[in-house]
Amino acid sequence: GGYRKGSVVRAVVAGQGGEVTLRGLGSASLSGKVNKEGTKLDKYAFAQGAEVLDVSDDRGAVIYPSRLAGLNLGSGKVKYYSLNPQGEIETLILNDVTGDAYQYGIITRFEEEGDGMSRYCTYQYDVGGASYTLSGSTRFPATGGAVRILGEPGNPERLYALTAVKGGQVAGNQLITGNQRYTLSDGVAVYEQRDGRYYLSSLARAESGGEVTGWYDKAESEGGRIRIIVVK
């Protein structure tokens, strides 16, 4: 039978013919806090080699249980889980917890002409070194800086502004500014800004100094991370 978008299914491959059958999996209710070591969710320990998938906007990110350390998984955040014979979590499918499945980029140019019905906007933005241009009557909440992209980069449904942290320095996997420390995403993108243009660079460039601005998607206590770094 057909399954609705967002349904959790198991794919079963039959015999040598390789025919794939989808079987629906019932949603399982589980909520609670992950301990600070990232080894337990509520009363359940994570099994060794536990598989965790976080799904956001039709994209999935495979993460380690340690990525969830200290997070509170409220109602609706767990789409599915299964336990092994020892009562440990072996599979966990999450609903938009960490934000790691989204794509992030930086707006390199924005122009707006006219207003009302005759308004025309042009966005140019870079995602991981790939440049995109989008023109039309739509004006997104973000018109500059780093963004979270909803939908495909070539034709996004929306661009959401990230929050900037200015004047910090990068050390290890953290951006430090004053007495605040922000953890970098494993997939953080670093851009060097020269003469008004953005060039995809490396974490080593951010660590070497300069005027550093980091951009995060949400508070770290909610799973947020520094997603974009710009160095001048």
Image (cartoon, grey):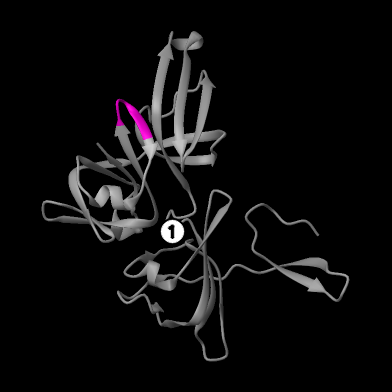
Rendered position, 71 above or below 205: below
Q: Nearer the viewer, residue 72 or 175?
A: 175
Kind of residue at badge 1: Val
The spot of residue 134 in percent (x, y) is: 52, 25
Q: In the rendered structure, which segment of residues is drawn in magenta? A: 194-198
Is residue 213 one of those drawn in magenta? no
Residue at 45% of width from left, 70% of height from top? 64
Seen from this angle, which residue lies furthest right?
A: 17
Rendered position, 165 above or below 134: below
Residue at 29% of width from left, 48% of height from top? 205
Q: Is residue 56 left or right of residue 216?
A: right
Q: Dividing the image into 4 quarters, which one contains the C terminus?
A: top left
The spot of residue 120 in percent (x, y) is: 48, 14
Q: Quadrant of residue 36?
A: bottom left
Q: Is residue 20 left or right of residue 154?
A: right
Q: Is residue 101 left or right of residue 141?
A: right
- The total number of labels drawn is 1
Judged from the image, the secondary structure of the residue bearing numbered disc 1 is loop
Q: Quadrant of residue 38?
A: bottom left
The spot of residue 33 in percent (x, y) is: 36, 71
Residue at 45% of width from left, 23% of height from top? 139
Seen from this angle, which residue lies furthest left?
A: 178
Q: Nearer the viewer, residue 211 or 175?
A: 211
Q: Dividing the image into 4 quarters, which one contains the N terminus?
A: bottom right
The spot of residue 107 in percent (x, y) is: 40, 31
Magenta highlight: main SS: strand
Residue located beneath label 1 in the image: 97
Instruction: Rate crowding at label 1 as few (under 14), some (14 to 19) or many (20 or more) other CA atoms within 10 Å.
Output: many
